[in-house]
Amino acid sequence: MSGNIPDSLSLLSVVIPARNESEILPCTVRKLTGVLSSAGVPHELVVVDDGSSDDSWNVLQTLVGEIDTLHPVRNLGLNGFGRAIVCGLDAVQGDSVVIFMADQSDSPEDVVSYWKKLNEGHDCVFGSRFISNSEVIDYPRFKLFINRLANFFIKVIFRIKLNDTTNAFKAYRKTVIDGCRPLISPHFNLTVELPLKAIVRGFTWTVVPISWRNRTSGTAKFKIKEMGSRYFFICAYIWLEKYFSRGDYRKR
């Protein structure tokens, strides 16, 4: 897309939704801030405790004394993956945002790549686990089949080349987040709402290969049987905007 190159960025906010992740949070936070600090990326870690019933909040409070870039927040409203991310987005101080999973399935090194790409002038950077130079480790076969089917459906109906829309791990300039509001998905369908709105509303984007590793501890929160209709709803909602809104919501 043509236009002026956006200003360089000054602070990366990493939003990490967490529900009952007390065992893995210390390792996730320490590793992430270590990689970002070593790479010279100015950052804050906004970890959102989404109604945990374990010791997650106390763990975060302890880590604050150790890691000065950590800014935990508590989602005191209704819980849900999408609601937790929106809670985190409301709390960020940075001019760019990465959504990062608490279970260490995402790579901190890829966050550094995202930061560099955003500073090249892109509005959004979308990681794909299914392009050349990407890496996927221990993805359950049935979930992988459903993932590829869902992403093919999205790719066709929106006529886009992105083949990993459903992955939450993506990066945005803060102006994109503001330009995609209101965000209405309370659950994992936010992972589709945010990138599709950004694309439909005319923000620039690029795709980079990323790595993904299945969690080795704790319990996965994503439930396939609960998400089908929710994904369909948000896709239909944004599809209608794309073809019938007459550009009312596009980037100006």
Image: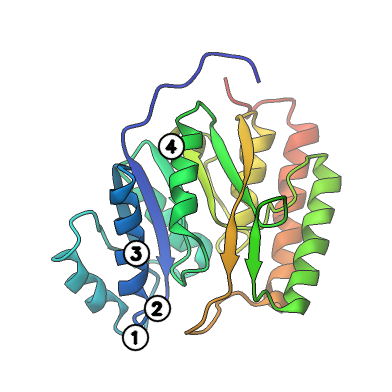
Q: Nearer the viewer, residue 154 or 138?
A: 138
Badge 4 marks a residue whose secondary structure is helix
- Comes first in the chain, label 1 or label 4: 1
Looking at the rendered image, the disc whose residue lies closer to the viewer, 3 or 2, is 3
Residue at image coords 51%, 35%: 117
- Can you tell which mark lies on residue 54? 1
Q: CA distance from mark 1 to mark 2?
A: 8 Å
Q: CA distance from mark 1 to mark 4?
A: 32 Å
Looking at the rendered image, the disc whose residue lies closer to the viewer, 3 or 4, is 3
Badge 1 marks a residue whose secondary structure is loop
Given contact means CB atoms under 8 Å apart, are the residues at marks 1 and 2 in contact?
yes
Q: Provide residue 166's location: percent of width, then percent of height.
A: 67, 57
- In the image, residue 71 sits, relative to residue 118, either above or below, namely below
**Quarter location, residue 60:** bottom left
Q: Which residue is mark 2?
A: 21
Q: Which residue is mark 4?
A: 174
Residue 186 visible in rendering: yes
- In the image, residue 5 sits, relative to residue 209, either above or below, namely above
Residue at image coords 31%, 78%: 56
